[in-house]
Structures are given as structure tokens and as C-alpha cells.
Amino acid sequence: MGLSFLLAVAVQKRGMKRSWKRRSRRRRRREIPMDLLIEIMARLPAKSVMRFKCISKFWSSLLCSRYFCNRFIMFPTQRQPRLYMSLLDQANYSKSVLLSSPASPSSIVFDQDLTIPNMGGYYLRAVRGFISFTVFKKEARIYNPSTRQLIILPAVESKILAEVDKYNISYFICYDPLKDQYKVLCTITVLSEDMQTIMSSERWVLVLEAGGSWKRVAKDFHPHFPDPLELTIKGVLYYLAWTDSHTCVLVSFDINSEEFSMLQVPRKPGDVLPMLDKWVAKIHYGGKVAVFDYTYLKESGTVDLWVVEDWRKQEWSMKTLTLQPSQMHLVIDNRLKPKGTMLNGKIILVPLKLVSPFYFLCYDLQTNDLKKVDIKGIPDRWFGKQAKCFDLEFMDPSENINYLET
């Protein structure tokens, strides 16, 4: 009797074990391979990925890994480019706001208020889903709209900041694809008392990583006063600068090697207007960096486009574009300023003053066509403010779920 009972128990256990093995095999067959899971997750919107982080420690670890974050940025095809607008109240920085909207080719309606406490910010720059802010001579800040992470960068420990009053600080955020590092370039320019002469300049680099600190680079590079807008092409950051009132240069900064070089911006024969009085901007043109001279756009509807064909040989090409007479009314009412290049290659021209109704112009350099795009959703109170500043920045479809460390 006892033996039969033990035999029955053994048989039952064996049957249960076989059943468990069958269920385990079926379960393994139903599991999604990890590499496929990552590819699926990398194609989801940032908001969905952020929710999955709350499932477990495993999911949080996976989705926070640098590998997954980089894979996520590589698949922006289902995401829309967005337009960001900062509005700065000079009387009270705490009342500054950041607005966002999908970048529609016909109209813009700001549908998101991304403002968070202590954001501040005026000049906007974007790279791989991150936005940098600067408020005149104050510290720079990095903001991630997807994670709402806000980083206040450490102050640059430059002696000249404590010794002089007339100086300018510019910050440029950039990405080094070779080392998978985010960096911030800071330029400090000391000016004479009359603000007409460049006395000296310094350049500092900060790697955005745990324990990162500012280091001074290119100590012997030519002093210059930079334009606050930059452009990055194939690991090289470009910005315009002035070495004196008559000389405008295009500066390149190799993000990986942290080396600088410059080219003098050419001008037409007979052009004697001081470069400091000209209206110029650098743009992305057909995979190359170019200088967009729009000094006479408002008066005659013409722009000169200088394209860098070979940096080492200092070779430029130039062509002049003239607006159609039927489109001149779009440029004579307000002084405009280029604010970058859209993914389709069109130049964005924005009024210098915040007027109502607000708008920007899309300039197609291939067809020489100009199109007006209305912007809605800006709170009415901003149009009546006297002490205000604003800035616009187009961001490519990239969203970034990475958390930066400093």
C-alpha cells in the first residue's frame, strides 16, 4: 500500500515535470528576442518609452542604457520636426516661457507650453533632442523636452570675467559622434570701452558627463567676436565672427579634436561697406556651409550666396538671387533675420520684432521662391511687452530620452 502510494506520487511528479517543461518550451517560443524588442521600442514615441521605464528595474535599466538611447535617436522617421519659441521677460526672467509646435509647412500653432521653473533662456540652440539656453551674461542651461530634465551648467572659471565689464559670452552645444559625447563650447570676447575693438578672446570646452569641468582650448587662436548662431555639418561646428569692423570670418571647430580654423568671408569687387554693417548669416546649403548675405534684401530683393567649396584651398563659389517683384511686399515691412535651414533646404527668415500677427518666411533657394507661414498660439500679453526678447529654433525629428550628467 505504501509502495503504491509512493509510486503514484512519483508518476504524478514526473507528469507535472513534463507538463512544466512543455509550458516552459511554449513560453520560450513566445518570448520576443531582446534585439528585436529594442528595435521595436526604438520606433515608439518618447512619451511611450518613458512610460515603459516604470514597469520594472529591468525595463528602466534597458531604456536608460546609452546603447538604446542612441538607437532611439536613429529612428526619427515617424516623428515630426518641431518649432520651439522662447519668450524672455527682461524685467522678470522667471516669467519666461518655452512654446512648441509641430513644424507644418503651411501654418504653425503653438500647442505645448514646455515651461518649467528656473528655465529662463533666450538664445535657443538644438542638437539631437537637446536645447540649450543662454540669458545674456548669465549661465547656460541644457533642457530636454522629452524628459523635462534641466541642467544648469557650471560657470566658466575665466579670470577675465572678474577683471573687465565689457565682454560677451556665447555658448554652443554640439555632439561628437566618434566619442559619443555631448559638449558645450564657450567663447568669451573682451571688448574696448567704446565696444568697437576686440581686445582678447578665450575658448572653453565642457564635456557633458559626470565630473566634467571646463577646460581652455586654442589659447593662441585669433581673437574674434562670434555670432550667437551656429551650424554643425559632419562633426564640425561653424559660426560667423568678426575680427574687426571690416573683417568677417567663418570659424570652424572640430568637435572631436577641438581644433579651430577660420576663413575670411569674401566680398564683391567694389563693395566697401564695413562687414560689421552688413547683414550676413551662415546656412546649410546642399551639404556644405555657406554665407547668406542679405544686406540688400529689403531694398532691392537681392541676396548673395557664398558657398565654401574647399575649406583647405579656401575656395568659394558665389551666386546672386533676386526675388520676384510680386514677392517684394513680404520683405519691405520688417527687417528679417535667417534662423537656420529646414530639412527640405529652405531658409527660415524671421522678423526681428515680435509683431502681431506673427509669421516667418520660407525661402527656397532652388526655386527662388518665398512663402509666408503664419504663427498662432503666442499669448497676447507678449505683444505689448516692452522689455522682451524672443528666439525661434527648428529641431529635426530627433527625440532624446537620455539623461545627461555633469
Image (cartoon, grey):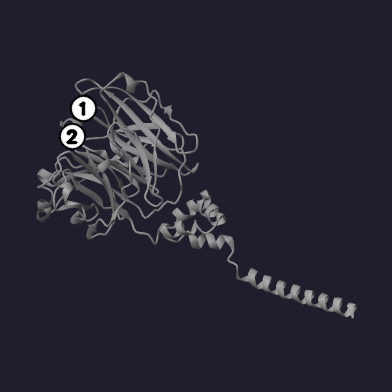
Tell me the amino acid under the disc marked 2: Pro
Q: From the viewer's side, name the closer residue of 82 and 300.
A: 82
Q: State which quadrant residue 25 falls in.
A: bottom right
The residue lying at 58 percent from left, 66 percent from top is 32
Horizontal side of 279 relative to 50 (left or right) equals left
Classify mark 1: residues with Cα within 10 Å, few (<14), some (14-19) or many (20+): some
Whether residue 313 is visible, yes or no, is no
Visible residue check, residue 229: yes
Res 245 label: 1
Q: Which mark is residue 269?
A: 2
* Drawn side of residue 320 relative to residue 55, left or right: left
Secondary element type, mark 1: loop
Which quadrant holds residue 11? bottom right
| Disc 2 crowd, CA 10 A, few/some/many (<14, 14-19, 20+) | few
**What is the three-letter code of the residue carrying label 1?**
Ser
Q: Is residue 94 above or below residue 26?
A: above
Q: Please, is residue 93 above or below residue 58 in the view?
A: above
In the displayed structure image, the side of residue 385 where residue 34 appears, left or right: right
Residue at horizontal 90 percent and vertical 81 percent from the top:
1
Residue displayed at 46% across by 48% down = 402
